[in-house]
């Protein structure tokens, strides 16, 4: 199970796990009902039980949930932890909870926890983490920039691949920044209260003063999560987390530029799209010691995404979708689920009615198995 390598890193993260254990001890008084979003091995669900929770709903969509059940049973918590396999979108709990908790990186944090809050948290309930702060700093990272961006400048096998570079310079890149890579101190861009945040969009501006001479390659973003008023965890460089568990996010600029002490780097971040963080935009201004603008870089992940005209058209508000042959097959399968038919019966019906889609029994079997995984129990 490939997932176990990731969970091994999580359990090796004594900094973060100790923070969650202390936060749950502070937040729970005894008898609370808790929802653990993305429980993994169930470690936070067990922490919640140890802190006094009377019931924990542990939601996980990966196969690791079967291992988590065994871990809970082996440690005497099987009677208090209810493991639910599936996406948070599909979960229906029998009751509202007192506490929602989850340990997630930047890209899932603002998507999953507010959703769990809106659907499952009691009025006046608590969410852990309670508050999230975003920080960024200008960085000199020549190796990363050469590997991810300038790699495409050079020809390979006597072929010019420079057309790829504009895509890479408009993408976000996970990285592990060292304190030595920072050209200036990190500045706080924004603070969000997860108990009240309702918008999938972010707008934040920050400025940092260059403290040492070097080459600016972009900015690095990190997150500080306040689990309670006094307990926090952060992946600020140098990150205390093992390996690549919680990396920072690197926002590159179009061309590396030389900077001197006293220069200013202004960063404006914005997210857009139907879900939080589906589109990122960043504008980075470099000013000299006198405040004169020297460089302006404007980037967007829209530019960094290969979108064919037909795909763009399908995303417009006035586009009228038409059901494909595979879509019709899916409708037949879901209808068969509702009728209580067996897997074998459904496969035979697909082969008979959708011969243009399923030429072999194995194709129909795989299609039905995927539909069961996503839309059935």
Image (cartoon, rainbow, N blue to C red):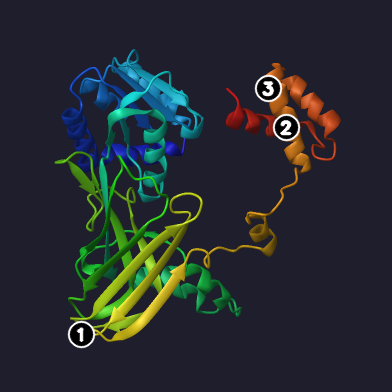
Question: Crowdedness of circle 1 by 10 Å Cα count: few (<14), some, many (20+)?
Answer: some
SS for tag 1? loop
Tell me the residue at 45%/24% (across/down): 84
Q: Which mark is residue 289?
A: 1
Name the quadrant containing residue 316: bottom right
Point 21% across, 30% down: residue: 24
Is any part of residue 116 visible from this angle?
Answer: yes
Residue 327 image offset from top left, x and y in percent? 73, 39
Question: Circle 2 — which element?
Answer: helix
Disc 3 target residue: 337
Identify the mark nearer the N-term, 1 or 3: 1
Check the picture and name the quadrant holding the C terminus: top right
Between residue 338 and residue 10, name the one nearer to us. Answer: 338
Tag 2 or tag 3, which sits nearer the N-term? 2
Residue 85 point in image, percent of width and height: 47, 26
Identify the residue at horizontal 55%, vertical 77% (top origin). 162
């Amino acid at each position: 199970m490939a997932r176990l390598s990731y969970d091994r890193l999580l359990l090796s993260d004594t900094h973060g796990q100790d923070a969650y254990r202390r936060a749950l001890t502070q937040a729970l008084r005894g008898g609370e009902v808790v929802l653990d979003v993305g429980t993994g091995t169930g470690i936070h669900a067990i922490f919640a039980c140890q802190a006094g929770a009377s019931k924990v709903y542990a939601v996980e969509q990966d196969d690791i949930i079967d291992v988590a059940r065994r871990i809970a049973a082996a440690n005497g918590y099987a009677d208090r932890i209810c493991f639910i396999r599936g996406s948070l979108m599909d979960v229906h709990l029998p009751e509202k909870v007192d506490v929602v908790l989850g340990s997630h990186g930047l890209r899932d944090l603002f998507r999953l926890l507010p959703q769990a809050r809106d659907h499952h948290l009691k009025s006046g309930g608590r969410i852990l983490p309670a508050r999230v702060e975003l920080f960024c700093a200008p960085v000199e990272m020549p190796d990363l920039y050469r590997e991810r961006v300038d790699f495409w400048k050079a020809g390979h096998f006597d072929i010019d691949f420079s057309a790829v570079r504009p895509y890479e310079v408009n993408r976000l890149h996970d990285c592990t920044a060292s304190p030595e890579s920072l050209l200036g101190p990190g500045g706080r861009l924004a603070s969000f209260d997860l108990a009240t945040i309702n918008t999938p969009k972010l707008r934040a501006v920050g400025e940092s003063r260059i403290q040492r001479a070097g080459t600016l390659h972009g900015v690095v973003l990190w997150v500080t999560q306040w689990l309670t008023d006094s307990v926090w965890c952060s992946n600020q460089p140098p990150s205390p987390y093992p390996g690549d568990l919680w990396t920072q996010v690197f926002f590159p600029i179009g061309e590396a530029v030389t900077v001197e002490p006293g220069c200013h780097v202004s960063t404006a971040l914005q997210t857009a799209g139907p879900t939080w963080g589906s589109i990122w935009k960043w504008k980075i201004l470099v000013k000299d010691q006198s405040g004169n603008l020297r460089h302006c870089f404007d980037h967007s992940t829209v530019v960094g995404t290969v979108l064919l005209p037909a795909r763009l058209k399908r995303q417009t508000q006035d586009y009228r979708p038409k059901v494909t042959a595979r879509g019709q097959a899916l409708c037949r399968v879901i209808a068969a689920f509702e009728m209580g038919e067996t897997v074998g019966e459904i496969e035979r019906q697909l082969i008979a009615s959708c011969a243009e889609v399923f030429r072999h029994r194995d194709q129909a079997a795989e299609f039905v198995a995927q539909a069961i995984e996503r839309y059935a129990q």
